[in-house]
């Protein structure tokens, strides 16, 4: 999947990542797709956590809020490192594997509440997409 990602300031991430003078040791479309999915996951997980806090039965959603916030933090840190194009493949693999685990756990927790809360359903779907993008990136690492 080839994407051209533009952020709100108009910067084209694909161009920025492609023009990076460092070694290109990863498939660029997989990297861009993962960075985009990570960013979407961060925003969605944070929004889901906030929405959970406004629910009447918030006590039943404590694990969901924690899972949302953990996933958002892991994804944000991973995206920040990936755009720097680190040269330590072991570190990159470890971070991407942590994202896969965090997204899987968050999706599973949100899926438990998806029938009652639309924000949890949407968050679970976003986490599953991010999990897939991270798996694709992991497979593309050389």
Image: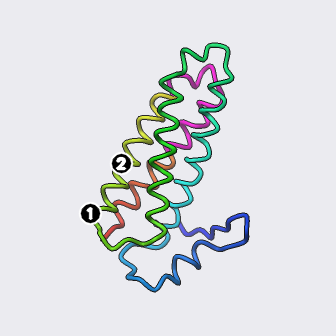
Q: Secondary structure at mark 1?
A: helix
Is residue 42 depicted above or below 108 in this figure? below
**From the image, which quarter does the C terminus lie in?**
bottom left
- Relative depth, front residue between 15 and 56: 56
Is residue 142 depicted above or below 43 in this figure? below
- Residue 90 is tagged as 1
Q: How far from the left and from the top, in percent, is residue 69?
A: 51, 37
Mark 1 packing: few (<14 Cα in 10 Å), some, or many (20+)? few
Q: How far from the left and from the top, in percent, is residue 27?
A: 42, 72
Q: Which residue is mark 2?
A: 98
Apparent side of residue 26 relative to residue 83 in the rendered image (left or right): left
Task: Provide the residue span drawn in magenta.
Answer: 111-128
In the displayed image of the protein, which residue is found farthest to the left?
Answer: 90
Q: Per the image, is 18 magenta?
A: no
Q: Are marks 1 and 2 in contact (CB under 8 Å)?
A: no
Is residue 27 depicted above or below 109 in this figure? below
Locate residue 96: give its quadrant: bottom left
Q: How many numbered marks does the figure carry?
A: 2
Mark 2 packing: few (<14 Cα in 10 Å), some, or many (20+)? some
In the displayed image of the protein, which residue is found farthest to the right?
Answer: 9
Q: How far from the left and from the top, in percent, is residue 135?
A: 38, 54
Q: Secondary structure at mark 2?
A: helix
**Residue lying at 46% horizontally and 39% vertically, measured from the top left:** 70
**Residue lying at 38% horizontally and 72% vertically, measured from the top left:** 26
Is residue 70 depicted above or below 57 in this figure? below
**Residue lying at 68% horizontally and 65% vertically, measured from the top left:** 7
Looking at the image, tell me whether mark 1 or mark 2 is earlier in sequence order: 1
Question: What is the distance, in whole Å, between disc 1 and disc 2 at their CAs?
Answer: 12 Å
Apparent side of residue 65 relative to residue 142 in the rendered image (left or right): right
- Residue 71 is tagged as none
Query: Principal SS element in the magenta part?
Result: helix
């Amino acid at each position: 999947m080839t994407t051209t990602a533009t952020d709100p300031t108009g910067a084209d991430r694909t161009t920025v990542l492609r023009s990076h003078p460092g070694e290109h040791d990863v498939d660029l479309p997989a990297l861009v797709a993962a960075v985009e999915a990570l960013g979407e996951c961060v925003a969605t997980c944070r929004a889901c956590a906030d929405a959970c806090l406004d629910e009447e039965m918030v006590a039943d959603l404590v694990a969901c809020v924690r899972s949302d916030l953990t996933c958002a933090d892991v994804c944000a840190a991973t995206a920040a490192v990936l755009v720097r194009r680190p040269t330590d493949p072991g570190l990159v693999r470890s971070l991407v594997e942590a994202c896969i685990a965090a997204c899987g756990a968050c999706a599973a927790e949100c899926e438990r509440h998806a029938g009652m809360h639309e924000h949890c359903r949407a968050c679970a779907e976003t986490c599953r997409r991010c999990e897939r993008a991270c798996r694709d990136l992991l497979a593309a690492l050389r």
